[in-house]
Image (cartoon, rainbow, N blue to C red):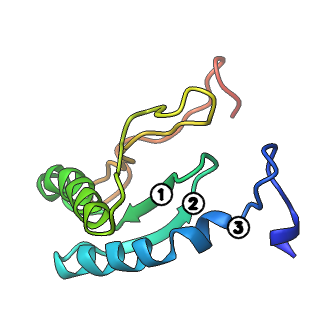
């Protein structure tokens, strides 16, 4: 059972799901009402860190889609008496991740950028 497995601090790995349940349900609902499709959610390694992935969109929409989820996360947190931070490493002795964006560039015929083997990284 996953809850029997603990991280290096002795906290069960699935604790993030349980503690953030109400917040996550409210956040996904608020994002959905704004037309943002949540593809997946999961707690990150650090305490209180959550990841929410929004479905890809056209380039111009993505610009707004980067700000809107952050401000929505903050608003939902405030309503629940919490505080949302997007600092890359808010707790010095814990893992960090900050807000980030994934990108994929393609045309109707093919991907415009592909991963090519590099001597600096594994293939």
Residue at position x 24%, y 76% in the image: 30
Residue 111 position, x and y percent, is 38, 51
Residue at position x 33%, y 72% in the image: 27
Labels 1 and 2 touching (C-beta < 8 A) = yes
How far apart are labels 3 and 1 at the CA level? Answer: 14 Å
Q: Nearer the viewer, residue 58 or 38?
A: 38
Residue 44 position, x and y percent, is 58, 53
Within 10 Å of the Cα at label 3, are there few (<14), some (14-19), or many (20+) other Cα atoms? some
Q: Nearer the viewer, residue 31 or 61?
A: 31
Residue at position x 78%, y 44% in the image: 9
* 1 to the left or right of 89: right
* 95 to the left or right of 58: right
Q: Quadrant of the N terminus?
A: bottom right
Q: Which residue is mark 2?
A: 43
Q: Between disc 3 and disc 1, whose residue precedes?
A: 3
Q: Which residue is mark 3?
A: 14
Name, please, the residue furthest toward the front: 81
Residue 73 vertical position relative to residue 101 in the rendered view, above or below: below
* 88 to the left or right of 116: left
Q: Which residue is mark 1?
A: 51
Within 10 Å of the Cα at label 1, are there few (<14), some (14-19), or many (20+) other Cα atoms? some
Residue 95, quarter of the rendered image: top right
Q: Between disc 1 and disc 2, whose residue precedes?
A: 2
* Mark 2 secondary-structure assignment: strand
Numbered disc in front, either 3 or 1? 3
How far apart are labels 3 and 2 at the CA level? Answer: 8 Å
* Mark 3 secondary-structure assignment: loop
Residue 75 vertical position relative to residue 122 in the rendered view, above or below: below
Q: Between disc 3 and disc 2, whose residue precedes?
A: 3
How far apart are labels 1 and 2 at the CA level? Answer: 6 Å
Q: Nearer the viewer, residue 19 or 97?
A: 19
């Amino acid at each position: 059972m996953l809850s029997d497995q603990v991280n290096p601090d002795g906290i069960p790995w699935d604790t993030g799901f349980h503690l953030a349940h109400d917040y996550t349900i409210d956040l996904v609902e608020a994002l959905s009402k704004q037309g943002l499709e949540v593809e997946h959610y999961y707690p990150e390694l650090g305490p209180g860190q959550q990841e929410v992935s929004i479905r890809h969109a056209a380039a111009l929409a993505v610009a707004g889609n980067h700000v809107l989820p952050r401000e929505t996360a903050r608003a939902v947190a405030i309503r629940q008496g919490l505080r949302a931070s997007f600092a890359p490493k808010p707790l010095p002795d814990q893992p960090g991740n900050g807000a980030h964006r994934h990108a994929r560039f393609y045309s109707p015929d093919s991907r415009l950028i592909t991963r090519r083997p590099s001597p600096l990284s594994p293939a």
